[in-house]
Amino acid sequence: MVKHEDFLQSVLNTKEGKINQLEKIVEKKETEYNFNHFVEARKIFDELEVREIRALINLFAVKRAQLNERAKQLNENVETEIDSNDYNDGEENDGHL
């Protein structure tokens, strides 16, 4: 009997873990939805709950970090292109390598 209870407890724990994962996914999708509507001015800041505002603040920080990383990569690419163009300044470029 104890083994059966242990088995059922493990099944219950597994189900709880899956439910927690799904809740996190739903919360993330709700935050993305609110973010998109907030950016598109479909949703007014006063309509949001405190939990949603905190989630949006965190999402804004993530988006800002992503934008900074993209800007850094772009600047590196531009510098690389400028350096390669400086190397070829003495040669005439006829479209072939």
Image (cartoon, rainbow, N blue to C red):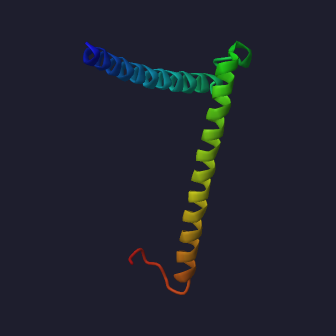
Which of the 4 quarters of the picture holds residue 9? Answer: top left
Which of the 4 quarters of the picture holds residue 52? Answer: top right
Judging depth in this view, the residue of 29 and 97 nearest the camera is 29
Q: Seen from this angle, which residue lies furthest front?
A: 2
Q: Seen from this angle, which residue lies furthest bottom?
A: 90
Judging depth in this view, the residue of 88 and 12 nearest the camera is 12
- Percent x, y of residue 82: 58, 72
- Percent x, y of residue 67: 61, 46
**Horizontal arrangement in the rendering, residue 43 relative to residue 91 (left or right):** right
**The C terminus is located in which quarter?**
bottom left
- Percent x, y of residue 90: 54, 87
**The N terminus is located in which quarter?**
top left
Q: Is residue 34 above or below residue 63?
A: above
Residue 41 in view, yes or no: no
Q: Is residue 45 above or below residue 89?
A: above
Which of the 4 quarters of the picture holds residue 8? Answer: top left
The residue lying at 57 percent from left, 52 percent from top is 70
The residue lying at 38 percent from left, 21 percent from top is 13
